[in-house]
Image: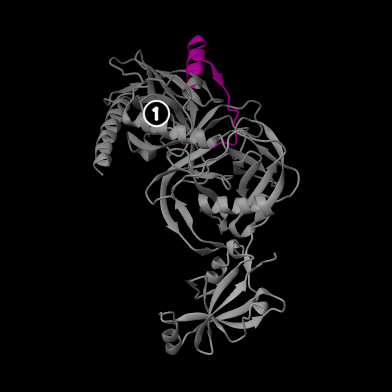
Amino acid sequence: MAKNVLVELSEALANAAEQAGGATVLVNARRRLPGSGIVYAADLILTADHIVERDEDITVLLADGTDIPAKLAGRDPGSDLALLRLEHAAAAIAAPASEAARVGQLALVLGRPGSEGLQASLGVVSAIGGPVRTGRGGMLERYIRTDAISYPGFSGGPLVDASGKVLGINTSGLARGMPLTIPADLAWQVAGSLAAHGHVLRGYLGIRSQPVEIPAAGQKALKREQAIGLLIVGVEADSPASSGDLMVGDILVGVAGAPVTDHDELYSHLSAEWIGKATPIELLRAGLPKVVNVTVGERKL
Amino acid sequence: MQNFLKFSVTLREALDELVQSLQSSLVVVRGHRFGAGAGIIWDSSGLILTNQHVVGEDPPVVLLPDNREVEARLVAQDAQVDLALLAVQAPDLTAVRPAPSLPRVGEMVFAFGHPWGQRGYVTSGIVSAVGAPRTAGSQHSLMVIRTDAPLAPGNSGGPLVNGAGEVVGINAMIVGGDQSIAIPVSVAHTFVQNALAHPGSARPPDRPDLQGVL
């Protein structure tokens, strides 16, 4: 081929598809159309939770054509991710991009939906959004959107950059069929937790609360403009909240230094890193600011 | 920014050259069944390649790039690979350059044809997949190229071209609206060789579940 700029661009794109495609697998875990996945570690496949409809009799078809039986290692419906453990190790492992996706950059959507082999489509990163409450009781801190087409069976496959590094995991299972991409750093976090515990750890306080307005005097006492806090309306018995001296009537206004104005924020701040640790909870009690340390527990599923 | 501007200029120049070179080998094939399709000048001696489903029972009329209208002779057709070989008698024909190998997934490709009668229309995309789908009710499976370059009726028989201006396939089908299928040029090569060895040969259709681009 004569090396013009089109040929060079073509070769770069084909190289990216080939590199990431080597770690893109077919996941056979539902009745009709198979889905896709990526090789997360030598014997672990990261895929979309919604395409894993059964816990047993799962097979994974690697890029080299070998079909390997796999077992479910863990799933997180909230982020629509699942981890499968292969009976023996795969060769190529997917490499996450070291930098976050940027709007406008070229991106390939890859999938391995059938025996025909790797499939790809090209587009750009259209938008970075979030946080968004997913339809399955979870929160996605960030998501990526692309105009590259996700063909049937692409869920669980990667969005890759022009060098073949994984920008995220594609799924149509989070937003009523609309394809979204879970950014690589979040997906790898979830995968790490699934590999270690079989589920995603979440912090637990043991309170029931509702958003309330903070009166002007309260905001003055807080020394910041925060119009909304969470009024504690119930404390579970024998919970971190009860042993940590949280009381009905307190207005929760912050966790570990970050302001909290709604349930979503409380949920995302109560991440796994605080479990078992004394965590400063900022309150307004009887109109006065107060910080109490609560040892955050683990939320049971 | 400067680099991007420079890149976009060289990109435009490369695209210009590619489009110019392909237009000189792109013909209109007026069959009598489905209206017009596209075709390519396969050989400067007057061999024209198009889709079988574009060609009707009667000899088709071919509109050459320089607007000469010539009556074509049907040399051979094969419905299983959806290809037909025509022969025209005309001087000064520019043949396409076939690619030496199958394209790779991810490569940029350009489709040429006459969608909805718009002559010499170019669309672009990448190679989405290269493989042999298993189709219901079919004994053999045919190697095909899938692309996200949009096709419409009138694209049939036109070339799918790589960045170097080489023909990688003959556009043949739309599947599911957002993916198109092309017959690899290697299949076309074999078909032409057989056609020249056994002129007048015809094979009936064997793919009832794929919808042709009319």
Q: For this rendering, which residue is in front, A221 or B71?
A: A221
Residue B207 lies in the magenta-colored region = yes
Q: Residue at x 49, y 71 (%)?
A: A257
On screen, residue A57 versus residue A35, left or right, reads right
On screen, residue B51 versus residue A274, left or right, reads left
Residue B212 visible in this rendered orientation of the protein: no
Compared to A22, does B68 lie above or below?
above
User: What percent of the width, then of the height, locates residue A245?
Assistant: 63, 81
Q: Chain of mark 1?
A: B
Compared to A78, does A279 lie above or below?
below
Q: Which amino acid, mark 1?
A: Asn
Q: Residue most toward the right?
A: A56
- Disc 1 secondary structure class: strand
Q: Which residue is mark 1?
A: B162
The stretch in magenta equals B188-213
Q: Residue at x 42, y 19 (%)?
A: B86
Q: Residue at x 63, y 25 (%)?
A: B140
